[in-house]
Amino acid sequence: IAKEVAKLLEMKAQLGEDEGKHKFVLKTPKGTRDYGPKQMAIRERAFNAIISCFKRHGAEVIDTPVFELKETLTGKYGEDSKLIYDLKDQGGELLSLRYDLTVPFARYLAMNKITNIKRYHIAKVYRRDNPAMTRGRYREFYQCDFDIAGQFDPMIPDAECLKIVHEILSDLQLGDFVIKVNDRRILDGMFAVCGVPDSKFRTICSSVDKLDKVPWEEVRSEMVGEKGLSPEAADRIGEYVRLHGGLDLIERLLQDPKLSQNKLAKEGLGDMKLLFEYLTLFGIAGKISFDLSLARGLDYYTGVIFEAVLLHQENEHVEEPVSVGSVAGGGRYDGLVGMFDPKGRKVPCVGVSIGIERIFSILEQRLEASEEKIRTTETQVLVASAQKKLLEERLKLISELWDAGIKAEMLYKKNPKLLNQLQYCEDTGIPLVAIVGEQELKDGVVKLRIVATREEVNVRRESLVEEIRIRTSQC
Amino acid sequence: IAKEVAKLLEMKAQLGEDEGKHKFVLKTPKGTRDYGPKQMAIRERAFNAIISCFKRHGAEVIDTPVFELKETLTGKYGEDSKLIYDLKDQGGELLSLRYDLTVPFARYLAMNKITNIKRYHIAKVYRRDNPAMTRGRYREFYQCDFDIAGQFDPMIPDAECLKIVHEILSDLQLGDFVIKVNDRRILDGMFAVCGVPDSKFRTICSSVDKLDKVPWEEVRSEMVGEKGLSPEAADRIGEYVRLHGGLDLIERLLQDPKLSQNKLAKEGLGDMKLLFEYLTLFGIAGKISFDLSLARGLDYYTGVIFEAVLLHQENEHVEEPVSVGSVAGGGRYDGLVGMFDPKGRKVPCVGVSIGIERIFSILEQRLEASEEKIRTTETQVLVASAQKKLLEERLKLISELWDAGIKAEMLYKKNPKLLNQLQYCEDTGIPLVAIVGEQELKDGVVKLRIVATREEVNVRRESLVEEIRIRTSQC
């Protein structure tokens, strides 16, 4: 990485010097990045783990356009709407880049009158946010979404979403984590019994949402100062949002003299209890924390909400693990599809979104630390020659190999040196070299060299494909 | 499809009725489409064939952002620049959606000072063109690009690009095809000897490019009428562009009294001869047609250009096969990276782009005609119950299966009917049902039902995972 940084600095310096001569700056747009072959290899590993999990749970896959009609996105994101990228009006429809995959999914369901589907969708979304790229926060980033739409018995699909988060985070071995859960109905009930006026529910909810980043005192002063909440109401909220726990806490709150009188809160707590029962059957209740401070920013949630955070033990002497940020989140949004349906018909939905960029950052850092050499191609064999004037023979042989499904490369030179050809294999991790020479051609054989051991064997030309398959098979 | 159309019409009618009540139209932007699970299954088949081929040829993979700085795209696409999507200026940089994957690739090479790479890139590109969606022409569409960058001996990478097109089109079994090749140097030499002024080379090239869609007479009148070319020069061009053939034609043109005097044309013809020699070694020369009417629209090509078209035998009595359009194209662009490099350093490149949307259309139509039932999930087993009150047992069992890597689903109901559970398997193609019941629980077994044969066997719970693996393994 030091080498890469040096390269970049050098390039930056050059760009600075040449600015006068060259009109354009050589860069990607702010908040975006290229993925080179190494990064792509890491990315594909992570995707494979995620896609395997989604398929294991029987999900179908869909795709939608990168942009939507601007009005499709309007009124879905609350205060965050200002972060939506609009396209320039070049005549025709007004368009915006998608901000998440949930709203396009709801539009898709309403448009195709689908009332029942379990699907995943992996695609890039766009937010004109302040990028913090070293921590994996970008303006263009992937989301990996799994959602269950349909009218079902309570909390069964919701529990499956949490199981999925648990499986993926365990599978990727990202270290210890906790999945915080709450319910919008519990939050709204709590706001009601604390004396928050109905009209302030959403904006006070936004304030609570900041509790994972700023201390209670700041959130309280925002509620009272900026948002005009009474200090007493704020303090009552303060009592609740410090609570987190498991089934015991749910039971306690079901007995809470104020909350238990509120219909919404009671419903939410009842379902939360059911959820914990299912999570216990799934064997994952230990990683779940019912947390009254979890609020989630988006407007469209109506029931269970959740967020997975990685815990980072700085060192063994630190008592409280430090959160390094959210890597997955989601919840129930029973009203969103109805916003699109001409007759307002509702399709209940619950889903989870895996925030893959932060996971990439972690995997990337880990790979660098481990000094594991990662291959960026799958080439099985290099077709090489020991003498000059054998280009035609190399072309004939490599063509045979390709047609037999063997992954093969050759150097694009008429007369490459054998040493350079062998060095290329060392550099790129190609395990075998198929060497053609005058004598081999006469004998009807190819010399197969095993790069790791430097062993060389003559293989009859007609057996070469089979021999390469055997020597490079993984199973 | 008739059912789908009926659905759409019904929806359209409803939308019409409700227009007053609902502000927004329920649609994707013009020229774009959603991919449902069925379409995605087809798309993934095609992608797999293409990616396998790219990997077989030792390519690495990269990814770039969906938008670039506007100035990165400026001056690369000639007359087509008007089709670029710009983003709205919301403060900050001016951005445009990528128009192809070639210009971002060149920007990537220059920015990272890479002089040598073989990479593929599969991603969506954007063109504000007139969509013709039934023929697979969209405003948002995938390109599958394979490019070789670096200073190599002539025509070896170029020949590999053509081999790749041949492999992919053969593998996808799209029917008969031909790959037309030409060279920008031959075209420019031809224009020179026909008396086209230097300043008109590119615009006359654009006219020639239309020959696959409109007859010569129209192209001629555009050249003479709109573009002010002398009728004599146009007629001389007309003589050349009707020529197509193989090595014989190359030899003849190398003897052509006028062309053979032109340095550029001679170079191009010499390389074309070499290319055909390599293609003969690859065994694919029979599908290649050296065609002087092939021009390609884009500005950045500097050498070999090519385009693959499918031939469609309307019926056996038609003598001349009918072209159903281009499905792949590409060429050499040795100057593009230099346009980005601060010091103008060139990196020679050649590449191919597979036009996947048209291929999708064909595969989709074929699948419908074949009545093959395509599965959209990979679920191996449905966890079901024969009696009521077994939700908890189903949850426990499915969790065990997921944790063992088995692809499993269950109905999200507390007490589903067995018949409904079996019907779900029929509908979605799930091959096995694991049934829990009171008796099975007592006996420590699970009843495994094979959907196709209706056979049922009791399997000890600890052997269930292994039994499911054996019964659903493909190899």
Image (cartoon, coloured by chain):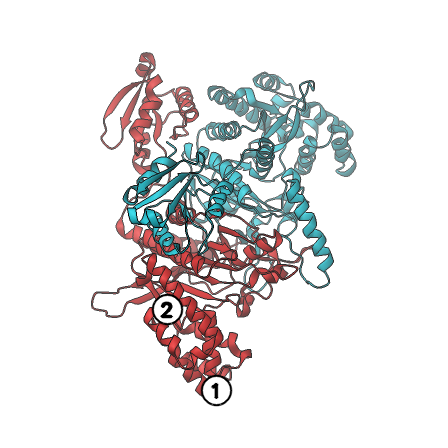
Chain colours: A cyan, B red
Q: What is the number of the mark on residue A373? A: none
Q: Residue at x 30, y 32 (%)?
A: B431
Looking at this view, is A313 or B133 the one in front? A313
Left or right of B23? Residue B352 is: left
In the displayed orientation, state which residue is furthest to the top: B442
Q: Amino acid at mark 2?
A: Phe
Q: Nearer the viewer, residue A313 or A107?
A: A313
Residue sticking out furthest to the front: A439
What is the x, y in percent for residue B429?
A: 31, 37
- Where disc 2 sits, the SS reads strand
What residue would you read off at disc 2?
Answer: B290
The residue wearing badge 1 is B230
Q: Is residue A51 left or right of residue A198?
A: left
Chain letter for the residue marked with disc 1 in the picture: B
Q: Position of residue B324 (x, y in %)?
A: 34, 64
Disc 1 marks a residue whose amino acid type is Ser
Question: Looking at this view, is B201 or A74 the one in front?
Answer: B201
N-terminal of the pair, mark 1 or mark 2, is: 1
Report the side of B255 relative to A32 (left or right): left
Inspect this view and state whether residue B181 appears. Answer: no
**Does A358 appear above or below B77?**
above
Residue A283 visible from this viewpoint: yes
**Count of numbered labels shown in the rendering:** 2
In the image, is B158 to the left or to the right of A227? left
Extreme residue in the left direction: B317
| Place of residue B84 in the rendered image (x, y in percent of width and height, measured from the top left) | 55, 62
Q: Read off the chain for label 2.
A: B
A380 to B473, vertically: above or below = below
* Quadrant of the snapshot with the C terminus of chain B: top left
Could you tell me which residue is drawn at 48 percent across and 34 percent down? A49
Which label sits in the foreground, 1 or 2?
Answer: 2
